[in-house]
Image: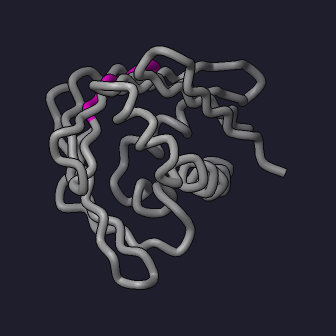
Amino acid sequence: MSNPVTVTTPDGVPFIFITREFDAPVEAVFRAHREPELIKQWLGPNGYEMDIDYYDFSSGGRYRYVHTNPEGSRFEFNGVFHVVRENEFAIQTFEFGGYPDVVSIESLTFVDLGDGRSRLEIHSTYPSIEARDGMAVSGMEKGVTEGYERLDVIVKKG
């Protein structure tokens, strides 16, 4: 059984908090966020194809990718990695092409729990509560959960 994803949308503030533990070392979880070929294997909902135009998980790097669902609908995402500290932390922007004027700022904290386990803590800040609520009801939690279940398989391989 995989570890549960916790998604919290606190009242009155435009935040989403996501927490997920992994039965793998923090280095493996960080690597799976850094390497484009690994990202393609786990990011997003089950059954979606992913094409990466560019992906540079380093301070000042950028990314752009497109998910295509089984029906052929395309979903574009892009952003900038402002800060990336190896096996510790990243700050990025996140923009969905379907809502080009809504950009969130996300921090990802990679926590070493010891004994070969780790936790990922994500804090997303949206420009408004309405924008945050739109993301929260978009199916995001399902996509995050399914993606992290596939990530479990990748990080266990080492």
Which stretch is magenta?
Answer: 87-93
Tell me what residue is drawn at x 54 percent, y 55 percent: 143
- Looking at the image, is 51 positioned above or below residue 60? below
Between 127 and 42, the one lying in front of the other is: 127
Q: Is 89 within the magenta?
A: yes
Location of residue 104 in the rendering, given as x and y in whole percent from the top left corner: 30, 31
- Looking at the image, is 78 positioned above or below residue 103? below
Tell me what residue is drawn at x 21 percent, y 54 percent: 97
Residue 86 in view, yes or no: no
Location of residue 140 in the rendering, given as x and y in whole percent from the top left corner: 50, 49
Between 41 and 102, the one lying in front of the other is: 102
Tell me what residue is drawn at x 33 percent, y 27 percent: 126
Location of residue 36 in the rendering, given as x and y in whole percent from the top left corner: 33, 54
Would you say 81 lies left or right of 44 here?
left
Residue furthest top in the image: 12
Would you say 44 lies left or right of 36 here?
right
Between 69 and 136, the one lying in front of the other is: 136
- The image quadrant that residue 90 belongs to is top left
Say how many tags the image has: 0
Location of residue 26 in the rendering, given as x and y in whole percent from the top left corner: 58, 29
- Our reading of the magenta stretch's main secondary structure is strand
